[in-house]
Amino acid sequence: MGRKKDKIDGKDKREKEELDMAILVTGGAGFIGSHTCVELQESGYDVVVLDNLCNSSEKSLERVEAITGKKVTFYKGDILDRDILGRIFEKEDIVCCFHFAGV
């Protein structure tokens, strides 16, 4: 006999919880970071980007939104700034980080 699954919107409960996770992408406005954001969003994840825009542009995030049809949460700041990191982790439900920011 199979195990009964809790269904939420056609997905089992664990699968639904996994898709509600927010992933922080540092350097997410750069080439590799923005392409990663597209793949993450198309896989159902919420994306939060931290970038100081020294080698990138917010235009790339606008393109990510145009491709995926989903909003990108963006914070302009430096990865070395503990205050902005603290604010991000307080406000967002970050469960994972892809680190593409140059230090």
Image (cartoon, rainbow, N blue to C red):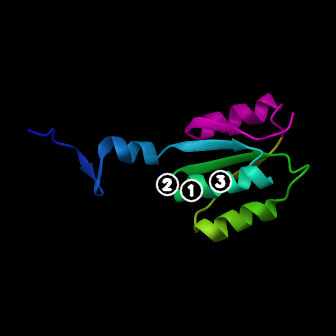
Q: Is residue 63 left or right of residue 20?
A: right
Within 10 Å of disc 1 (Cα), the crowding (few <14, some 14-19, many 20+) is: many
Which residue is depicted at the point 87% across and 33% down? 103
The spot of residue 17 in percent (x, y) is 40, 43
Instruction: Classify mark 2: helix, strand or loop.
Output: loop
Report the magenta residues as a range.
78-103
Q: Residue furthest right?
A: 54
Whether tag 2 and tag 1 are in contact, CB under 8 A, the answer is: yes
Q: Nearer the viewer, residue 41 or 46?
A: 41
Q: Residue furthest top?
A: 82
- How much space separates mark 2 and mark 1, taking CA atoms? 5 Å
| In the rendered image, the vertical position of residue 81 relative to residue 44, given as above or below | above
Residue 44: give its label. Answer: 2
Within 10 Å of disc 3 (Cα), the crowding (few <14, some 14-19, many 20+) is: many
| In the rendered image, the vertical position of residue 15 relative to residue 43, given as above or below | above
Q: Which amino acid does label 2 sit on?
A: Gly
Q: Which of 36 and 26 is in front in this view?
A: 36
Whether tag 3 and tag 2 are in contact, CB under 8 A, the answer is: no
Which residue is depicted at the point 80% across and 40% down? 101
Q: What residue type is labelled 3?
A: Cys
Which residue is depicted at the point 80% across and 60% down? 58
